[in-house]
Image (spheres, grey):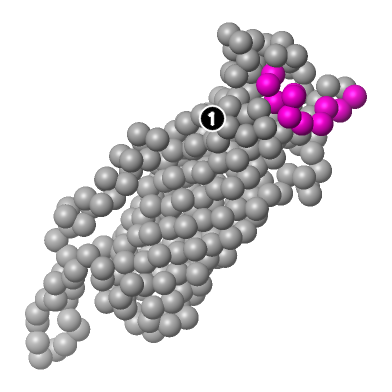
Amino acid sequence: MKLSLSILILFLTLPGLYAQTIDEADTEQDSTESLTFFDNFYIEAGGGSQILFSKDVENLDNKQRLTPSLSLSVGKWFSGTFGAGIKFQGYSLNGFSTTEGTYTAAPDNGNLFEQDPVRKEVTINPDGTYRHFIRYTNISLNFYASIVNLLTGCKEHNIFDIIPSVGIGNMHVFAYKGVPKTNTLSANFGLTGKFHLSPVVDLNINACTAIFDNKFEGRIAGTREYENYVSASIGIVYYVKSRKF
């Protein structure tokens, strides 16, 4: 989890990299107001569903492929248009294995499917295939921008916003039902529709994807070097102090 710790340390040092001031919209006065760390600082909790895209997983039906997704985020807007945050997302993914591939948890990374430790923990189909269960968390540092504020300026009466994001993270898979514990770098991309409900509460509709190494769940199959999941969720955002932009 060294990468996760590095992400957290980087985020905590970000406020010191920004000189934060805002101009007061007053024709008779031209002054600035210093912002503290907790101004425009938020916490978001969300939940939804996700689906894994990997080799052979299309053999599962849609009900088996869709799994729950939970998330918790903390972040801060440094201006009316740009911000950053740390996101913890995870819970479960469902994958599918055949009798072909390389198993990183088998002795000497063997390619004999009989050596795959997951086979002792799951139901094996007559043809030797099986569904495997992945428990994970993806911890990422993300940077985001307000499209509406970039195009129209920061206005208090704006009740809707579109926010793209990009980030880097650590995809941690827990040891579970034969799937080995692993850590791999993840690239994260998201798009959020934000609705302002009150000065301190927002409703977010989130769509995101994370891309990571093919062997993240202990099996290397096919020619793709990377696999990914896509999730959709609804989140409630609470601002520690009222927004000042």
Give coordinates of residue 33: x percent, y percent: 14, 76
Secondary structure at numbered mark 1? loop
* Residue found at x 36% / y 72%: 239
**Residue labelled with disc 1:** 181
10 Å crowding of disc 1: few (<14), some (14-19), many (20+): some
Q: Residue furthest bottom?
A: 28
**Where does the N terminus fall, quadrant-wise?**
top left
Q: Main secondary structure of the magenta part?
A: loop
Residue 109 vs 238, above or below: the answer is: above
Residue 168 vs 232, above or below: the answer is: above
Taking 22 as reference, is 76 left or right?
right
Taking 174 as reference, is 84 left or right?
left
Residue 222 visible in the snapshot: no
* Residue found at x 51% / y 29%: 182
- Place residue 26 in its image quadrant: bottom left
Give coordinates of residue 169: x percent, y percent: 42, 41
Residue 114 vs 169, above or below: the answer is: above
| Viewer-closest of 68 and 160 | 68
Residue 74 visible in the snapshot: yes
Taking 54 as reference, is 136 left or right?
left
What's drawn in magenta, residue-wise?
A: 116-126
Give coordinates of residue 25: x percent, y percent: 19, 84
**Where does the C terminus fall, quadrant-wise?**
bottom left
* Residue found at x 43% / y 52%: 87
| Number of marks | 1
Give coordinates of residue 147: x percent, y percent: 40, 64
Amino acid type of the residue that numbered disc 1 sits on in the rendered structure: Lys
